[in-house]
Image (tube, coloured by chain):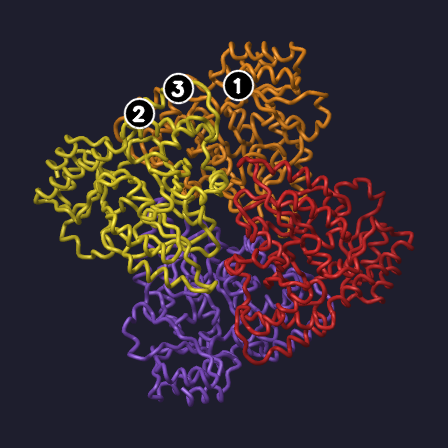
Chain colours: A orange, B yellow, C red, D purple
Amino acid sequence: MFFASDNWSGAHPKIAESLTRFASGYAAAYGTSDHDKLIEAKFNDMFEREVAVFFVATGTAANSLALASVAKAGGVTFCHYDAHVNSDEGGAPEFLTGATRLFPVEGDNGKIDPEALDIAVSRFDVPSVHHGRPMAITVTQATEAGTVYSLGELDAIAAVAKEKSLPLHMDGARFANALVALKASPAEMTWKRGIDILSFGGTKNGCWCAEAIIFFKPEMAEEMPYIRKRSAQLFSKTRFISAQLEAYLENDLWLELAAHSNAMADRLRAGLTAKNTTRLAWDTTANEVFAVADKDAVARARAKGAMVYDWLPPRDMPHLLGANETLLRLVTSFATTEEEVDQFIEVV
Amino acid sequence: MFFASDNWSGAHPKIAESLTRFASGYAAAYGTSDHDKLIEAKFNDMFEREVAVFFVATGTAANSLALASVAKAGGVTFCHYDAHVNSDEGGAPEFLTGATRLFPVEGDNGKIDPEALDIAVSRFDVPSVHHGRPMAITVTQATEAGTVYSLGELDAIAAVAKEKSLPLHMDGARFANALVALKASPAEMTWKRGIDILSFGGTKNGCWCAEAIIFFKPEMAEEMPYIRKRSAQLFSKTRFISAQLEAYLENDLWLELAAHSNAMADRLRAGLTAKNTTRLAWDTTANEVFAVADKDAVARARAKGAMVYDWLPPRDMPHLLGANETLLRLVTSFATTEEEVDQFIEVV
Amino acid sequence: MFFASDNWSGAHPKIAESLTRFASGYAAAYGTSDHDKLIEAKFNDMFEREVAVFFVATGTAANSLALASVAKAGGVTFCHYDAHVNSDEGGAPEFLTGATRLFPVEGDNGKIDPEALDIAVSRFDVPSVHHGRPMAITVTQATEAGTVYSLGELDAIAAVAKEKSLPLHMDGARFANALVALKASPAEMTWKRGIDILSFGGTKNGCWCAEAIIFFKPEMAEEMPYIRKRSAQLFSKTRFISAQLEAYLENDLWLELAAHSNAMADRLRAGLTAKNTTRLAWDTTANEVFAVADKDAVARARAKGAMVYDWLPPRDMPHLLGANETLLRLVTSFATTEEEVDQFIEVV
Amino acid sequence: MFFASDNWSGAHPKIAESLTRFASGYAAAYGTSDHDKLIEAKFNDMFEREVAVFFVATGTAANSLALASVAKAGGVTFCHYDAHVNSDEGGAPEFLTGATRLFPVEGDNGKIDPEALDIAVSRFDVPSVHHGRPMAITVTQATEAGTVYSLGELDAIAAVAKEKSLPLHMDGARFANALVALKASPAEMTWKRGIDILSFGGTKNGCWCAEAIIFFKPEMAEEMPYIRKRSAQLFSKTRFISAQLEAYLENDLWLELAAHSNAMADRLRAGLTAKNTTRLAWDTTANEVFAVADKDAVARARAKGAMVYDWLPPRDMPHLLGANETLLRLVTSFATTEEEVDQFIEVV
């Protein structure tokens, strides 16, 4: 009954197996081997266009270096208030972009409100050196609230980015979960919507450590090799990333794992709704579930081995919790089993 | 016949196996799991004292963040002219320390000359804000020249560090190779010599990706958790590092691999000395061999599949090469076989 | 009729005269001359304790380097939403502190609400590397809204700082105006309230360019000489700052100028209240006045030479403006005359 | 008898007078006033082409921000070993460029050797992310050794810059002294030689504080307004810079002052050569004189009030000093008098 986070899981057996398969032999280091290039080429196929691909060590690195690639003096990046980049990256986006600023924008359900975004950007979009100047917009898909931007919602954000001539970045730490939820193609959910740069996350979805920055306009990536090296994010044995990604992408394993993870979340959602000690705090569609729960019930469940985190209610939901209630975040992963879900529903 | 670098190898079978073994189940993320703590405790045993251990993604990150932990405004770090940190890290040490400076010091055989070091440090060790101020000394063990500081040579460097009250860092990207060459214990080669911080490298010696920063005075590491996070070097599934290191340290596999690698270099050294198309450029004791070779012989060897790099002669050896000669760097690894060595000796 | 800003004025005649008086002769450079030390000693007298004084070039530099002196990895500084440091310094606080973050806190009248501050700080004051960690609190006195924290209000902020063990900085770009408005002594408005570091501004109050960072605990300033030099803020001919400050402090000229400036603002406030084309947007006590004005009246005044800026209404006052109304900011200075004020009142 | 440095002088009477003249009245702040624009236009005339002009607070800021305008990840700037930027700016060039690196190049008489430069740049000019990549070349005119690059010598440096497509910066802290020594026009000594960016220094030559960055291709300066603001180098009352420069440039006062300063250095050179207790260490042509002197003679001169600095012999002149000899640096300025010089010659 582990629902703490999807990074509490290990790696999918096929990922582990691939690492074993690639362990022998020699290959050029620092991302220059044939196999690295082969994997990069798979991203071209997946996204139905030529892309530039850069492996990095962590999702935080992917987001931070994506923004670093468009950084400028006095730059301001617009994100949702609860975006991972704003709340959980310990200053890395600021540090690795050379001290640019994040500007949080409001919006329900973890999604940036396009009107609020337009107002926020406009405040900085003036010919003045004093206030800072717009540099990028970043959306998280799936969001930190477990929700997923619809294609139309992405279009609305992209319209602001286009009007303001700003690069648009997507934090795809849970890219596969969002994709499966939307039943969209990778291209449809990214560059066809106006996304310029994607943090493509594999770690939360069954890899050990596989994060990539994808540029949909390769010419935007010219500085990236130097930016990545300067940030100490260029692996020497890049094969260990390629090996994971080969298995991850093979026969759409990645989508299968995300579909499983989302299905487990569906099962959780159904179960929690049916119980009278718990209810859903809000609707989610990806692999995160937020539930209001009776504190005693939660204590009982924990006593029986359930691993779940209490969560801070969103700032715009001050009355979410009743007496003796707490907010739980539950995250499913490729490794979550029906038994785990059912057992949790039972004990809570 | 792959002698390009030790990071062209993959991973040792036992490392791969360990990753498979740890792939299932759940564990706390971000370095807080029991298993992570278990591995950290093994470092205490290995070094015969309590140490603070921080996993990071690359050797460049280990070096850069080690220096970041002692960084200050206007700080200057003293290193050998050919140190990896000075020559091959693309500005990462400067960037990740918040813009401090490296100051190269001369010395034969890739080793810092203690007298030159003393003079260099003294130049900056004055009460003035204009010139910068000493911040750290860093040695590479084994060096980039394939040589190894003797314990006495490390003492001489440490004496300067002590006299100037400077923290002393060791870049141990090839730590195991040096240790085996010296037949010293980890403690003898580090804190017993006055080393304060160590970049402990496992990647070049059979891991996929396993680098750690070791603080021999844990109180010096208080800022490190924040420094590491800010630099996007905190893995979420740290288990994948711990799993590698468990196998790496188990039954001294790491020393066995380094011993093999050094032995293969010995075999290369003997073979190259015996040939009349090649000679050793200088003596080395770890797993790097530098050879002056006839260009035609090298071309022939390459035509038969040998993968070796031409190398720039050191600045203090302007007359190293004769007519039609080139300098080669050959690196052996855990994966190098006697057959590979013998075949190369034959074809060169 | 120039009310654009107090930095549109030049320098007070006595400041200019002092520069002429000190123009000849020789003095040690880089802040080491006897005269520099003499001026620094005057700050000891003024603040009734030993302080450490650092001249810098701009108010932005004073604020940024004050924060740099307490910066740490992942650090977060709490300020009012409309603080100059947050709105008007073009990313300098982030850049010069090595990429720390500003976190804006709400509060009426341009003043930080102590409860909101406590909540905001508490959110970051947890043992986690992910969210960033509290580093400092900064208040602006007088505020950007023309208001002045009472001594009791400063105490309430300081109580949070003390409870959270955070250094407390005051942006005193208009320090003298606040002091005069409160009829307090420099000591009473600063370290006796718990202020640790002060940006002492002379430029807006009659100097050409005279900004200083004052540390009330000199031991907190140990790194400052290096921080200042690294940021290119160490003047060579520091005498030109000392000369200005000698005249500025002599016979309390600085307080006299601020009193005049505040009195001119009082006159403006009275005049604008009496007119039926204008009204005060909110109460202010220092040398900034915010007025809601009829757009036609403003256009007429501008046609007759009035120089005033339109201002963005505060986010918490969405209904401030009626039809055909605009918000004006009017700033008085040492150079403002009664005639200018009366003429503006007449034409608006 | 003050020969410590040209920044020990105050300001020329005409500079002080101009500050008094401009002290009254109002002018737009932050460099937007008519007068600021008028002064900027004078630079167009002076340089016989359209230039972009940015005032900053210190020479260190001018150099650092000039380099920041061409900075890139992993960037390396080539300078002379003894360049001010390398020896005396306390890490500011590294810090304000976002952590790029300076690479010192050898050369006699304080001048970069063009061949050594070509070799150094070529070492970095390879398609690799590991070593850093060339970003700029910077020359100091007049040099720190008191010498002046001839126009031909500048051409040789510029040829390397052109071949390598690198921007070429000139540190002109003593620009006027060099210009007068060469009898060249400002255009001839800068853009006609291939200089792209100039640090134009007025402070050492009679201003209180007047430093400007000049871009000879204004399109290279597009980012500068933001870079300057972010570095806290945008003065609010820019009039105080413009006022100084108006007097400085009026009727070629600046050249007159530099000519005087150089003439005083000539007088020193002649006098020191004639004495048997002193001799010139090497030939200089601008306002710095380096003399080998008998230590007893120096002690006697100091006892009589002479203010001169001992200097470290250049690394390539290890045998410069005989027994009981020291190296002195003597700097003249606009304020140096014939009497001072003669008196020093007499007492030394």
Whether residue A162 is visible here, answered yes or no, is: no
In this picture, residue A86 sits left or right of residue B11:
right
Q: Which mark is residue A332?
A: 1
- Which of the 4 quarters of the picture holds residue D262? bottom left
Disc 1 marks which amino acid?
Thr
User: Are the residues flagged by discs 2 and 3 from a single subunit?
Assistant: yes
- Say left or right for C77 vs C261: left
| Disc 3 residue crowd, few under 14, some 14–19, many 20+, Cα 10 Å | few
Look at label 2 and name its amino acid. Phe
Taking A39 as reference, is B177 left or right? Answer: left
Which quadrant of the structure image shows residue D30? bottom right
Residue drawn at 34 percent across, 77 percent down: D282
Task: Find residue D77 and report its image quarter.
Answer: bottom left
**How far across and down, in percent of the image, does residue B74 sit?**
46, 57
Q: Are marks 1 and 3 in contact (CB under 8 Å)?
A: no
**Rendered residue at 51%/10% (across/down):** A338
Between disc 1 and disc 3, whose residue precedes?
A: 3
Give the residue number, with chain letter if any, for mark 2: A22
The crowding category of the residue bearing disc 1, from other C-alpha atoms within 10 Å (few below 14, some 14 to 19, many at least 20), is many
What's the chain of the residue with tag 3? Answer: A
Q: Which residue bears the numbered disc 3?
A: A250
Image: D328 above or below B245: below
Front in this rendered view, residue D318 or B180: B180
Residue type at mark 3 is Glu
